[in-house]
Image: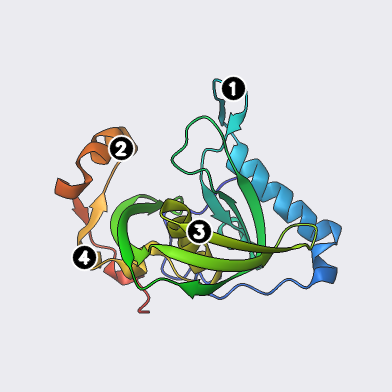
């Protein structure tokens, strides 16, 4: 399963608001198969941790990243913890409250594999969603998990992290071979790429 790379300016599905999934649709084989594909992608080529569990290779993925117009995302809320995971399937997630206090975190996207950037988002948020069985979920998230959910809900609303960069003409250019070096020096990184043509104003 391949994701589009790099993102094209006319990639319409990634730039439109995803279709709300009714509970009746959620129970169909077609939608459940899409959820399985999201989970398969998240776990593809993942490695076992020391406790024997599989660790996801990406911490978040939305259905439109795989070409499906469905308001569904998969997230690992154990982001930053190497030895366990906390996978959630979120259907029709909505941010019901967000703090005025912001935090700045480094973000990237599998659709833009060589692009990174520092983005300011709310430190704490509250979310309502359904799980894949149609049960209602309420989440109160702080720090990295809150950032992750804002990123993925952005995807479902046709937004990308580059839309929130302070200067999209100077997004960070980070090749895979340079990633570990970048993680140590993101605040002083001096390799840039202009993504302003891909940005959609908020």
Q: In the visual, does 32 lie left or right of 151?
A: right
- Mark 2 residue element: helix
- Mark 4 residue element: helix
The residue that disc 4 covers is: 169
Query: Is 172 in front, or is 50?
Result: 50
Q: Nearer the viewer, mark 3 or mark 4?
A: 3
Query: Is 134 in front, or is 14?
Result: 134
Q: Quadrant of the N terminus?
A: top right
- Mark 3 residue element: strand
Q: Specify which label sits upstream in the sequence, 3 or 4.
A: 3
Q: Quadrant of the C terminus?
A: bottom left
Between the residue at mark 2 and the residue at mark 1, the CA separation in whole angstroms equals: 26 Å
The residue that disc 3 covers is: 141
Q: Specify which label sits upstream in the sequence, 2 or 3.
A: 3
Q: Specify which label sits upstream in the sequence, 1 or 3.
A: 1
The reply to whether callout 3 and callout 4 are in contact (CB within 8 Å) is no
Q: Nearer the viewer, mark 2 or mark 3?
A: 3
Q: Nearer the viewer, mark 4 or mark 2?
A: 2
Q: Residues within 10 Å of mark 1 (few under 14, many from 20)?
A: few
**Residue 86 occupies quadrant:** top right
The residue that disc 2 covers is: 179
Between the residue at mark 4 and the residue at mark 2, the CA separation in whole angstroms equals: 20 Å
Residue 14 can be seen, yes or no: no
Between the residue at mark 3 and the residue at mark 4, the CA separation in whole angstroms equals: 31 Å
- Mark 1 residue element: loop
The residue that disc 1 covers is: 51
Q: Specify which label sits upstream in the sequence, 4 or 2.
A: 4
Q: Residues within 10 Å of mark 2 (few under 14, many from 20)?
A: some
Q: In the visual, does 53 lie left or right of 195?
A: right
In the rendered image, residue 20, in percent from the top left (x then y), is placed at 69, 74
Q: Nearer the viewer, mark 2 or mark 1?
A: 1
């Amino acid at each position: 399963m391949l994701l589009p790379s790099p993102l094209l300016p006319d990639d319409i599905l990634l730039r439109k608001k995803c279709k709300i999934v009714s509970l009746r649709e959620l129970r169909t084989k077609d939608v459940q198969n899409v959820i399985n594909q999201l989970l398969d992608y998240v776990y593809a080529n993942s490695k076992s941790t020391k406790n024997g569990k599989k660790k996801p290779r990406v911490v978040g993925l939305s259905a439109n990243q795989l070409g499906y117009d469905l308001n569904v995302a998969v997230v690992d809320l154990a982001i930053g913890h190497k030895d366990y995971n906390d996978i959630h399937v979120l259907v029709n997630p909505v941010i019901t409250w967000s703090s005025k206090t912001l935090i700045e975190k480094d973000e990237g996207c599998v659709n833009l594999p060589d692009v990174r950037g520092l983005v300011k988002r709310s430190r704490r948020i509250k979310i309502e969603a359904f799980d894949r069985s149609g049960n209602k979920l309420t989440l109160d998230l702080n720090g990295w998990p809150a950032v992750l959910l804002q990123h993925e809900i952005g995807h479902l609303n046709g937004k990308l992290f580059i839309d929130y960069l302070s200067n999209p003409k100077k997004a960070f250019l980070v090749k895979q071979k340079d990633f570990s070096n970048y993680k140590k020096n993101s605040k002083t990184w001096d390799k840039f790429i202009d993504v302003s043509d891909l940005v959609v104003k908020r």
